[in-house]
């Protein structure tokens, strides 16, 4: 096992601009079929706590280490009470220093921007990684994580849970059977209230410094990010509001709504991202409402050019097709990540093919054909999708053992997150972006192209940008 010292000494710098080939490598098991995976959990409050409990509930893992930058916070206490004798750490680097040889896999349920260094260190130490969506905060970080997962042959899973539920297997089956074909437009929407909606209009800069809570390790919370003075508006889920730390409504819900279409239609990365509407735009927090257009080229002979239209904001609804019917009920889990209350239109999508229209919700919700009369006519000819052999958490742990392939492994999840990241950059800059899929560069704006890499890491965190 590599120690932290070895991690620092043996890292080789990777080029941020290079295009990396990503191919699937089967997970290399670290436990025999009858052994449990020794799991370390980084981020144990709010959504992170949900992940800890869900992985433990599979019966396939032992919780051997708990790590959170605020062990005294109210939201960490439930996990601490459940596992009172498990070693505790505030700094994941110290956890790996002391326990690397006792850990097989790591869960990462921390704020979006800090997914990257924890995941990278774990992978370089040969640990399997389960990380909440989105994978990371910048295009370059995702490139590096995909390359590292390939090099070190570890099992990886991003936490878009619907990728192990009914929608995944239905979309795969219907695509392979030619039911879903010639898709030229996808409309995706999430119109629920978000944290920043209550104070977006009052933000004219970064919030002022406040006293750091005694229980919080603020420096480690910031990890590689540019230094910010502590303010309570940055923590406990509010980090999602800020471009510097979070990925907004698109980064939060896009992976639950567009994931199967992105994978099985082989969308990859767009050539253009255009902000059609950005209500309440400012350069610090996400807009009150966004409408974005993503344009994708033809992908081979059988996949025509396609546009995705994304809508967020409480009153920013798309035009629905005739015969839409009732809104799709989604199976989104309750969590501490912000309000999931929605209007009369639930989170979901409409998929427009040449001769069929499909509607679906988020997470594992299945598609239906509209209008209802068309669905009834086709019902007897539709192929039946297999049931999932494992939920998302069990799929990951079986992947650690080499018994299943992780369905949302980094090579699948990475391009999806990079697609969403381009949309977030268009929101941040309030401008159209032109992206070259071959050179993997933004060609119409140097500032935007620089955001693919993002700000330089703080001193002492440079070593994480290596494979």
Image (cartoon, rainbow, N blue to C red):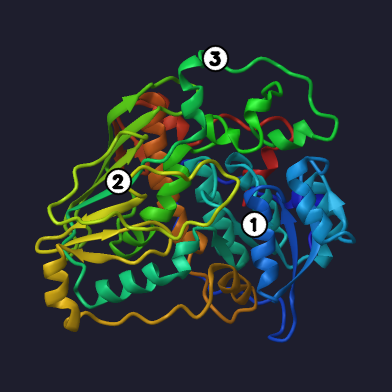
> Looking at this view, is 121 or 346 the one in front?
346
Secondary structure found at label 3: loop
N-terminal of the two: label 2 or label 1? 1
Q: Quadrant of residue 59?
A: bottom right
> Residue at coordinates 85% horizontally, 52% vertically from top-left?
88
Determine the CA span between mark 3 and mark 2: 31 Å
> Residue at coordinates 68% horizontally, 26% vertically from top-left?
232
Secondary structure found at label 1: helix
Q: Which residue is mark 2?
A: 270
Residue 282, compared with residue 295, is above or below; it is above
Could you tell me if residue 285 is visible in this image?
Answer: no
Does 43 sit left or right of 172 as displayed? right
Does 306 sit left or right of 432 as displayed? left
Q: Quadrant of residue 226?
A: top right
Q: Residue furthest left?
A: 355
Does 320 sit left or right of 123 as displayed? left
> Residue at coordinates 80% horizontally, 35% vertically from top-left?
217
Q: Which residue is mark 1?
A: 50
> Looking at this view, is 466 or 348 the one in front?
348
Determine the CA span between mark 2 and mark 1: 33 Å
- Which numbered circle lies on residue 205? 3
Residue 199 percent across, percent down from the top left: 51, 22
N-terminal of the two: label 3 or label 2? 3
How many labels, in total? 3
Marks 3 and 2 in Cβ contact (< 8 Å): no
Residue 66, compared with residue 223, is above or below; it is below
- Which numbered circle lies on residue 425? none
Residue 204 percent across, percent down from the top left: 51, 13
Quadrant (top left/top right/bottom left/bottom right) for the N terminus? bottom right
Q: Residue furthest right?
A: 85
């Amino acid at each position: 096992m590599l120690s932290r010292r070895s991690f620092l000494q043996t890292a080789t710098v990777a080029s941020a601009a290079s295009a990396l080939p990503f191919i699937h490598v089967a997970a290399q098991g670290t436990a025999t079929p009858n052994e449990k995976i020794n799991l370390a959990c980084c981020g144990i409050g709010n959504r992170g706590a949900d992940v800890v409990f869900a992985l433990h509930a599979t019966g396939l893992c032992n919780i051997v280490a708990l790590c959170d930058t605020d062990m005294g916070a109210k939201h960490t206490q439930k996990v601490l009470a459940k596992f009172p004798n498990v070693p505790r750490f505030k700094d994941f680097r110290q956890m790996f220093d002391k326990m690397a040889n006792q850990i097989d896999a790591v869960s990462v349920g921390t704020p979006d921007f800090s997914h990257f260094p924890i995941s990278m260190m774990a992978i370089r130490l040969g640990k399997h990684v389960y990380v909440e969506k989105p994978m990371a905060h910048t295009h370059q970080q995702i490139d590096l994580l995909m390359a590292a997962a390939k090099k070190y042959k570890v099992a990886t899973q991003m936490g878009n849970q619907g990728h192990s539920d009914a929608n995944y297997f239905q979309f795969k089956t219907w695509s392979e059977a030619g039911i879903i074909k010639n898709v030229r437009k996808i409309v995706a929407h999430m119109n629920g209230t978000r944290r920043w909606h209550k104070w977006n209009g009052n933000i004219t800069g970064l919030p002022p410094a406040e006293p750091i809570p005694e229980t919080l390790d603020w420096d480690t919370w910031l990890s590689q990010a540019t230094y910010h003075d502590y303010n309570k508006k940055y923590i406990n889920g509010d980090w999602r509001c800020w471009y510097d730390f979070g990925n907004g409504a698109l980064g939060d819900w896009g992976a639950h709504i567009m994931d199967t279409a992105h994978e099985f239609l082989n969308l990859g990365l767009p050539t253009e991202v255009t902000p059609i509407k950005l209500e309440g735009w400012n350069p610090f927090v996400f807009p009150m409402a966004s409408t974005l257009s993503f344009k994708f080229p033809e992908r081979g002979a059988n996949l025509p050019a396609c546009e995705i239209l994304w809508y967020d904001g409480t009153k920013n609804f798309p035009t629905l097709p005739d015969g839409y019917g009732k809104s799709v009920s989604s199976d989104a889990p309750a969590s501490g990540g912000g309000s999931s209350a929605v209007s009369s239109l639930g989170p979901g999508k409409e998929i427009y093919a040449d001769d069929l229209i499909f509607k679906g919700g988020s997470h594992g919700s299945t598609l239906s054909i509209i209008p209802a009369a068309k669905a009834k006519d086709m019902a007897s000819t539709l192929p039946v999708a297999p049931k999932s052999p494992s939920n998302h958490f069990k799929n990951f742990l079986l992947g650690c053992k080499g018994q299943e392939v992780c369905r949302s492994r980094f090579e699948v999840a990475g391009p999806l997150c990079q697609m969403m990241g381009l949309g977030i950059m268009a929101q941040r800059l309030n401008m159209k972006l032109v992206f070259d899929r071959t050179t993997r560069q933004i060609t119409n704006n140097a500032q935007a192209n620089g955001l693919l890499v993002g700000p330089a890491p703080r001193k002492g965190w440079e070593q994480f940008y290596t494979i």
